[in-house]
Amino acid sequence: MSEATTTVRGFSPVKPTRTNMRDYDLMLISTVGALLIFGLIMVYSASIALADGPKYVNADRYFFFTRHLIFIIVGVVACLLSLQIPMGLWEKHALHLYILSAVFLLLVLIPFIGREVNGAHRWIPVGPINFQPSELTKFSMIIFTAWYTVRKKQYMKQVRGFLPILGFTAIVACFLIAEPDLGATMVVIAIVFGLIFLGGVNLKVFASLIVLAVLGIVGLIVMAPWRLQRIFAYLDPFSTEHAQSTGYQLSHSLIAVGRGEIFGVGLGFSIEKLHYLPEAHTDFIMAVVGEELGFIGIFMVIMLFAIIVKKGLKIGNQAIAMDREFNGLVAQGIAIWFGVQAFINLGVCFGLLPTKGLTLPLVSYGGSALVMNLIAVALLLRVDYENRCLMRGQHIEARRRG
C-alpha cells in the first residue's frame, strides 16, 4: 500500500517519524491495563469476607473475583470489537443510540422488567447478570452530544442552538431521577455541559446553565428527605444521630482511610471490609485501597486516572486540529466522564462530597459499568488510531484494508 505525502491541515507534510509511529498509544493502553489488574486484585481483597455473611451465604470467597474476571474478559472482547468500528459509523447512528438508551431507561421503571434493590429501579435482569441502563446512557450521551454539537456548531452561541440538546438531556435526566439515581444524573449533566462548552457555547450562557443545574440539584436534594439526611450526615458523620444510620458508610470509609496512613496496613489486612463497610467492593473500594495500601495506593490510582484524562483531552485536541470535530468531542467527552466520575467516587470515599452511589471506572466491581467503560476506552483508542493514520497521510479505510 503506497503512503500519501499530502499535507494534513494544521500539520506539516508527513515525516518519516510519523510513518513509523505505532497504531496505538502504549501509555494509554498500559494505564487502562494497570487499572483493570489493580481493580481485580482489590475486588478480590475487598470481597473475600462477604461469603461469611448471611447475604452471600451460597457464595465462596472467589465468587466476586471470578465474576469480575469474566466481566473484564467480556469487556476486553467488546473493546476489541468496538475498536474495529470507524468513528463515522458511531456518528451516523448517534441518534439511534440515544433513543435506545432512553428506551432502556424507560423499561427499567416498568414493574416486572426492572429489578428493585433497596427501593431503586436501576437494573434489568438478563439471565445471570443485571444490566444497568444508566451506564449505556453515559456512553450514548457522549456520542449524541458530540454529534449534535458538530451539526449545530454555527448556532451553539444562540438559544436555538443549545436549547434542544438541553431538552434531550432533560428527558434522560428525568428517567434517571425516577429510578432514582442522582449520581448518574450528575455525571450525564457534567458530560453534556462539558461538551457543549467545548463546542462553543458562550461563557456567560454556560455559567448561567451551571447555576441552573446546581439549583436544580439542590432542589432535588431538598425535596427528598433521604437525600437531605445524607447532607446532614456528610457534615457530621460521627455524630450520635448519624453514625449508625445515614452516616454509617461515610464514617467507616473515613476510619478505613485513616487507618491506612501513608503506606497502609498491608494488602488483604483491612478490618473495615469485614462486614463493617457496606459496598466495600463497589462504591467504596477506594476506602479499602486507602486502608490496605495507604496514601501511596490512593496517589497511584489518582495518577493513573490523571493520565487517562490528559490523554483523552490531548487526543481530542489532535482530532479537532485535523477537522475531525466529532472524533475530538467524543474523546474529550470520555475524558470528562472518567474524570468526573472518578472525582465524585474519590470525593465520597474521603468525605469531600456527600455519599452517592457511583462506582470507580475500571476498578469497582460491576458488569455493566466495566463493559461500557472498556467500550469507551475503545472509542478513545479508535480516535487516536484515526489521528495517527491522518498524520501519516493515510486514508483510514485504505489503512484498514492494508
Image (cartoon, rainbow, N blue to C red):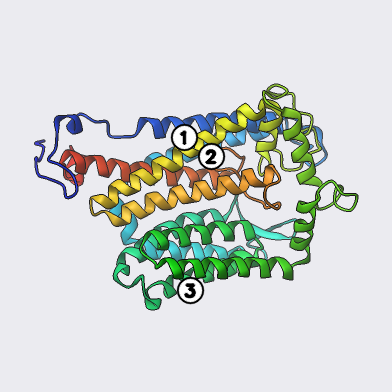
Residue type beneath disc 2: Leu
The residues tagged by marks 1 and 3 sit, at their Cα atoms, a distance apart of: 34 Å
The correct choice, above or below, for 230 with respect to 314 in the image is: below
The residues tagged by marks 2 and 1 sit, at their Cα atoms, a distance apart of: 8 Å
Answer yes or no: do the residues labelled 2 and 1 have beta carbons within 8 Å?
Answer: yes
Residue 34 in view in this figure = yes
Q: Give the residue displayed 50% in from the left and 56% down from the top.
A: 138
Residue 167's disc is 3
Q: Secondary structure at mark 1?
A: helix
Residue type beneath disc 3: Gly
Residue type beneath disc 1: Val
- The answer to whether residue 334 is left or right of residue 60 is left
Answer yes or no: do the residues labelled 1 and 3 have beta carbons within 8 Å?
Answer: no
The residues tagged by marks 2 and 3 sit, at their Cα atoms, a distance apart of: 30 Å
Q: Nearer the viewer, residue 18 or 57?
A: 18
Q: Earlier in the sequence, mark 2 or mark 1?
A: 1
Q: Which residue is mark 1?
A: 32
The correct choice, above or below, for 248 with respect to 220 in the image is: above
Q: Residues within 10 Å of mark 1 (few under 14, many from 20)?
A: some
Q: Nearer the viewer, residue 141 or 194?
A: 194
Q: Residues within 10 Å of mark 3 (few under 14, many from 20)?
A: few
Q: Which residue is mark 2?
A: 362
Residue 33 image position (x, y, % from top left): 47, 31
Q: Residues within 10 Å of mark 2 (few under 14, many from 20)?
A: many
The correct choice, above or below, for 46 with respect to 96 in the image is: above
Q: Secondary structure at mark 2?
A: loop
